[in-house]
Amino acid sequence: MNANKKHPSGLYFLFTVEMWERFNYYGMRAILALFMTSAVIGFDKAMSSQIYGWFTAFVYLTPLFGGLLADRIIGKRRSVAIGAVVMAAGQFTLAAYDVVPPRVALFAGLTLIIIGNGFFKPNISSIVGELYEPNDDRRDRAFTIFYMGINLGALVAPFVCGGLGQGIAWKYGFMAAGAGMILGLITYLSLQKRFLGDIGIAPVGNGRGEKSFALVPEEGEKSFAPTSKQPLTKEDRDKIKAIFTFTFFAVFFFTFFEQAGTSLTFFADEATRLPVINLFGWEMQVRSSFFQSINPMFVLILAPLFSVLWRKLGKREPSIPNKFGWGLFLQGIAFAVITVGASVYIADGKPVSMLWLVALYFFCTSGELCLSPIGLSMVTKLAPAKYMSLLMGVWFTSSFLGNMLAGFLASFYETWQLTTLFSVPAVLSFVFALFMWVMTRKVKAWMHGVN
C-alpha cells in the first residue's frame, strides 16, 4: 500500500508530453467541422458530421494496432516518438490547403493524424501504468492527474487554434496545433531517459522473456517484472471479460459525449449568443470553437475534487461498475438540460444564453470523470501484462465505435428537430446507466477483487 507516498517524477513528465499532444489534437478538432463547412472545403453539415465521426472513430481504432506493434516489435517508447512525428506532419498537411487541392490536404492530413495517434495514444497511457506496481493504490489518482494533463492542453488549444483559425485563416489554426506537437516531441526526446529509465523500451511479447514492466524502483520499493511467457489463467480471462463489458458501455457514453465537435459546435455557432468580452480594455469576440474549452476547464476544476472524494470515501468508494453507471447517468442529465435549451431556442426563434451549453458541459464533465480516467486505470489493473497495450487499444475501440455513431447521430442536425436530436442521448444514457448498475455484482465477480 503506497497511498501516502509521492507519485514518481515520470508521471509529471508524461503529463507534460501528453498535454502538448492533446493541444495538437484538440486544437485541430475545435475547428475541423467548421473548416469542412466553410467555403474552403464546402461540405454541408451532414457530410461534415459523418467525415468528422469517421475521422475521430479511426483515431481511436488505430491504437489497437499501435499497441500490438509496440508490444510485439517496436516497444512503447519508440512508438510514442513515431506517433508524435506523424501527427505533427498531419497538422502541417492540413494547413497546406492553399498549396494543394483543399480536399486532398484535408484527407491526407487527417490520415496522417489517424496513423500517428495509433502509435502514440495507447503507449503513453501504458507507460503511466508501468510506473506503479499492480496493487499500488496511487494508480487511480495517478491517472486522474494524467487526465488533467490531457485537459490542460485541451483547454488552451481551442482559444489559440480556434482564435487563429476562425479569426485570421484556417491554416494558422492547424499550424499552431502542429507546433504544439513539435514542442511535445522535443520535450519527450530530450528528457525521456532521465525520467523513465528503461520503462517501455523493450517489446514485451517477443517470446524472449523481457520484462513487461521495467520499473525504476522508488526508494524502499521493489521492482515488479512479470514475464511474457505466462499462460492466461481463468482469472485472467474473467478480467478480460470485465474489460470488454466496460468497453461496451463506454461506447454509448462516447457516442453522446463526442457531440461536442459537431452538433454542439453547430448549436454554439447558430443557436447561441456569442458575446464580445472586454478584458482590461481589450475586446475579444467569443468564437463558437471556444466552447470546446469548457469541458477541459471543468475537468481541471473538478478532477482534483473527484480525486479527493475517492480518497476520502476509502472503503466506501464506489466500485468501477458503479462509477460507470454514474458517468452515464450524469451525461443523461446533461442532455436533458440542453434539450430544454433547444426548446427555448425553437420557441423564441433567436439565439439563447451560452449558459445552457455551460450547464451541459458541467454535467458531461462530471460523468466523464466517473468513467474515462477510471477506464484507463481499469485496463492497467485488469489486463494481463503481456497484453497490456493491446487491451488498452481495445479500450480505445469504445471511442472508435462511439465516435462513428456520434457522427451518424450528428448528421441529422439539419433534418431532426433539435429537441429530438438532444433528447435521444438523454434517454439512452439513463437506460444504459440502469443496465450498468444491474450488472454490477456480476462484473465485480469477474474482476476478482480488483478495486
Image: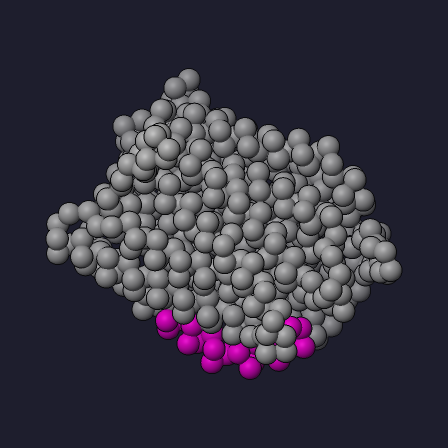
* Residue plotted at (24% across, 57% down): 341
- In this rendering, the answer to whether 440 lies above or below 106 is below
Residue at the top extreme of this rendering: 99
* Residue plotted at (59% across, 74% down): 313
Q: Nearer the viewer, residue 320 or 44?
A: 320
**Left or right of 337 in this view: 395:** right
Quarter holding the N terminus is: bottom right
* Residue 190, visible in the rendered structure: yes
- In this rendering, the answer to whether 207 lies above or below 59 is below
* Residue plotted at (69% across, 50% down): 11
Query: What x and y, as percent, mark residue 314?
Result: 63, 75
* Residue 384, visible in the rendered structure: no
Q: Nearer the viewer, residue 240 or 182?
A: 182
**Left or right of 343 in this view: 396:** right
Q: Is residue 446 magenta?
A: yes
- In this rendering, the answer to whether 269 lies above or below 206 is above
Q: Is residue 171 magenta?
A: no
Q: Nearer the viewer, residue 368 or 300?
A: 300
* Residue plotted at (50% across, 79% down): 439
Image quarter of residue 192: top right
Residue at the front extreme of this rendering: 280
**Left or right of 176 in this view: 406:** left
User: Bounds of the magenta span?
Assistant: 430-451
Query: What x and y, as percent, mark residue 321?
Result: 54, 73
- In this rendering, the answer to whether 32 lies above or below 69 is above
Magenta stretch: dominant SS?
A: helix
Query: What x and y, as percent, mark residue 69?
Result: 67, 46
Image quarter of residue 308: bottom right
Q: Nearer the viewer, residue 11 or 324?
A: 11
